[in-house]
Amino acid sequence: MSDAPRIVEVDRLDCRLVAHHWAYAEAAAEEMDRHWAERVAHNPTLYDGPVLLACRAEVVEDAGHRTLKLDAFETRFSYFLGWRELGWRDTSVFNCFAMPAVRSSDGCYLLGEMGPGHSVAGYRYFPGGTPDPSDVIEGGVVDLEGSLVRELLEETGLHATEGVAAPGWSVIFDGQRIACLKRLDWPAPASAIREQVRAHIAGEPKPELSDAHMLAPGRHADPRLPPFMTAFLAHAAAWA
């Protein structure tokens, strides 16, 4: 697998909840439980709730339309964290999530800086998170767009309906991460968006973010940005 993130533009996402036995988590359970105990001792705010990972990810083309098809299964956050932080040893599963790329009227993108209680404190991402069972709707469909809307509101106070969604998705394959990004064109300049989000953070009793930032598209050499973020910002320069 190439180390460089790969970007694929798709028309839609099709994610379904399935029953899946995660053999790796069972085999590595003792090691991951020890890892979780160490992480919680360092950061007691971490919570071992259920999350959804993907055991299948495939881009399918039909009649000129591309669909990202995903099979998702439920596991514990502690197992997800151990799998991620112990080196992604099992490459049969993926961390697939949806994020809004909120673009200001003057062409900058909104990023949130993860707060001290987060498992990736200090890193900068678009608003979002790993989906969980609350994102499963009728028929076992995992509503990734609904997850995007929820996370945007919870983290920033912004309502997705205030922006204009671009058609389709930019899907970034970055090792075991699959980031599904949808551009939202916002009718406000970068300074106003940042001020609004900062006010939301200041008003939250337990904010997930510690700060908000606005970045212009292009190449950014910042260790606080994960590779899929730098890949998207470089890719987005073509839309400027």
Image (tube, rainbow, N blue to C red):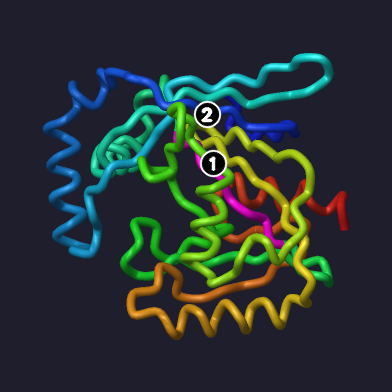
The answer to whether one can see residue 91 in this image is: no
Residue at left 55%, top 35%?
A: 178
Residue at left 54%, top 66%?
A: 112
Which residue is under mark 1?
Answer: 144
Residue at left 70%, top 40%?
A: 170
Q: In the orientation shown, which residue stands out farthest toward the top?
A: 62
Q: Decide which of 192, 29 is in the foreground and name it.
A: 192
Q: Position of residue 68 (x, y in %)?
A: 63, 26
What is the three-letter code of the residue carrying label 1? Leu
Left or right for 44, reference 184: left
Separation of marks 2 and 1 at Cα, in angstroms: 8 Å
Q: Is the residue under label 1 in contact with that under label 2 (CB below 8 Å)?
A: yes
Is 195 a magenta residue? no
- Crowdedness of circle 1 by 10 Å Cα count: few (<14), some, many (20+)? many
Q: Decide which of 48, 234 is in the foreground and name it.
A: 48
Q: Which quadrant is home to the N terminus?
A: top right
Q: For residue 6, what is the image quadrant? A: top right
**Which secondary structure dominates the residues rendered in magenta?**
strand
Boundaries of the magenta span: 95-102
Q: Secondary structure at mark 2?
A: strand
The answer to whether one can see residue 222 in this image is: yes
Q: Position of residue 49 (x, y in %)?
A: 25, 47
Task: Judge whether 203 appears above or below 23 on screen.
Answer: below
Query: Number of callouts in the render?
Result: 2
Q: In the orientation shown, which residue stands out farthest toward the front?
A: 138
Q: Which mark is residue 15?
A: 2
Left or right for 196, reference 137: right
Residue at left 19%, top 44%?
A: 35
Disc with the residue nearer the chain's start (2 vs 1): 2
What is the three-letter code of the residue carrying label 2? Cys
Q: Secondary structure at mark 1?
A: helix
Q: Decide which of 28, 180 is in the foreground and name it.
A: 180
